[in-house]
Amino acid sequence: MTDARDSLAPPADDPLAILARMWLIRAFEEQASALYAKGIIRGLLHLGIGQEGVAVGTASALRPEDLVFGTHRAHAHALAKGVDPVRLLAELAGRTTGLCAGKGGSMHISAPEVGFVTATGVVGGGIPLAVGAAYAARVRGDDRVALAFFGDGAGQTGSFHESLNIASLWRLPIVFVCENNGYAEFTPLSAHTNIERLATHAGTYGIEAETVDGNDVVAVRDAVSRAAEAARAGGGPRFVEALTYRLRGHYEGDPAKYRELAELSDWRAKDPLARYRDRLQADGLLDADGTTVGGIEAEARRRIESATRQALAAPLPAPDDVTRHVYAS
Amino acid sequence: MADIRYLDAIRTALEDELAADDAVCLLGEDITLGGPFGATKGLVDRFGEWRIRNTPISEATVVGLAVGAALTGARPVVEVMFIDFITLAMDQLVNHAAKLRYMSGGALSVPLTIRAQFGATGGFGAQHSQSLEAWFAHVPGLRVLAPSTPADAYAALRAAIRADDPVLYLEHRGLYWERGEQADPAAADPWRVRVRRPGRDVTILAWSRMVSLALEAADRLAADGIEAEVVDIRALSPLDLEGIVASARRTRRVAVVHEAVTTGGLGAEIAAAITEAAFGDLAAPVLRIGAPFAPPPAGPELEALFVPSVDRVVEATCALVRGSAPASIGVAPTSA
């Protein structure tokens, strides 16, 4: 394995690093699910299994200093941007060594040191934050780009529309990335709005938009790359809608009976990891590098096993920790 | 230092902080024109249209984007034209600004100031006159300041902007044109109470515009031989309980006056805290004086009945001292 594949920095142009990162996320999410089933992780756990292509495609199009804001389903966003899986697992398990000292949990991850500013448990709530990061970059005159992930459910919030309006009005360096997985919580998007493609809204505010296959990591990377560079160059905001699907329920424990099995199996056949693996194999890249498909997956699982041991060995919080970090001093 | 108006103290504090730190920026509706009362007038000429930024009427996103800017290196000050409109931004203020430091285990900081004017004066009616401070004092992670003098307004706003926490800075519309010294050493620490008038018989606790009302009441009580100590709370969250309880122990009788409705108001919290800390030292139950349990009415005559008056403070405080055990004012809905 090369350094790029071991590093926590977002994979850029290395196809094997991109595949390895998607596998790392898949292995992380499956481990989180297993730990949840055992009661080691508690609370609300929203997994991004099936949506790895959007997260990794997006992160691979950004610079390390670019500022990403995630959703309640943000493990993949965070890991793609370079968050340490040991500290993220420790966070999910409520350990003091967690990213957020055990106070954020699954839905409120922050790792500003790798440009993953924060996630939020409020649907649509993170979009204005990203607009603010873009505004701050503009005031300072630096060339960082802000990026907001949100789902199709957020498209019906006021914050979404206000944010698109302000970003457009002020020509801010921001990329809006909609993960359209077809379901807003337990009901299909069609029960929330007559608008089929959220990118439609971008046009209303004069923002250029693309809708891409979110399970094609390269298509996502290329679209976000075009969007980020246009925003960075002063072209104002861009909007990328990635069509994808969550292969699990809304959260762990949701049996997702509102979905047809046929729909699920159709989307399983479009698994972003398998598709990218097949593509690299067809291109001869996996073999040429001396790396096997199984080897990349096994390495990801080994890393997550090791991360789990480290995370769970960490101490639980002390009583005094309840009131720490409320105020700056 | 010259005598200045409360509104000018706010403007000067903004200008001084903008000049001292490039990270400071102002956001709000119509602020390049000065806003409805002129608090930001002329600042765009000196600091430019990016740092003095007019926004659309989108309170939720404007507060949210200020939070995002604060998370990533800026020190924004948002003008929410009326505190009533902050209801539109409650998610961003309560779920995001107040909690991001805690939820991130200290990895994030939200150095954000929200300026909002509040209070019932001028007949603006129920959606432009409320006193909602208790809502925000109930939220861990927020700080709330409500200065009563130009000197305090200046010092408190500079402290708010420099704080690494989100601060709700409350300005009473009825104080904007009040005059006073800008520089006053007693205004130095806005997070502590300030004894505005010492007295031995009773403590009147108040903030913002109710302080001048309490001082006027104290003058009239003095004519009746009652020496009231007037304590300006200044910081509504976190409360300076040490300063509050110290005064309660000195005088053994306490009245809390606020313009908000009494039910669930901050006076209830203060009364409970005093009772818990100093019950044995009290000669009487803590008295609350506030608005009746009704929205602020628009008609000037009704509005005057709604807001606590000097007469009511004098009457209730006098009864408190003379031992005729007055009932707290404003608790029960006015009978039909």
Image (spheres, coloured by chain):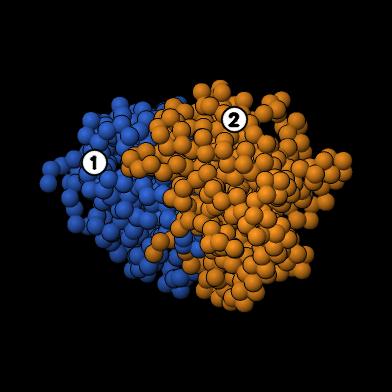
Chain colours: A orange, B blue
Using the rendered view, name the quadrant where residue B123 is placed: top left
Give the alpha-carbon distance from disc 1 to disc 2, as whole Å. Answer: 43 Å
What is the quadrant of residue B38 in the picture?
Answer: top left
Residue at image coords 58%, 77% = A315
Mark 1 or mark 2, which is nearer to you? 2
Give above or below for A87 relative to A176.
below
Residue drawn at 79 percent across, 52 percent down: A254
Residue B116 placement (x, y as % from top left): 39, 40
**Quadrant (top left, top right, bottom left, bottom right) of the C terminus of chain B:** top right
- Of residue B162 and residue B157, the one placed in the foreground of this image is B162
The one nearer the camera, A324 or A61, is A61
- Of B72 and A31, which appears nearest the observer? A31
Amino acid at circle 1: Glu
Is B78 on the left-hand or right-hand side of B87? left
Residue situated furthest right in the rendering: A261
Q: Secondary structure at mark 2?
A: strand
- Subunit under mark 2: A
State whether residue A188 appears in this view. Answer: yes
Q: Identify residue for label 1.
A: B15
Q: Give x and y (percent) for residue B146.
A: 36, 48
- Residue B259 vs A326, above or below: the answer is above
Relative placement, left or right, of A198 versus B143 is right
Q: Which residue is mark 2?
A: A210
Residue toward you, A125 or B171: A125
Q: Chain of mark 1?
A: B
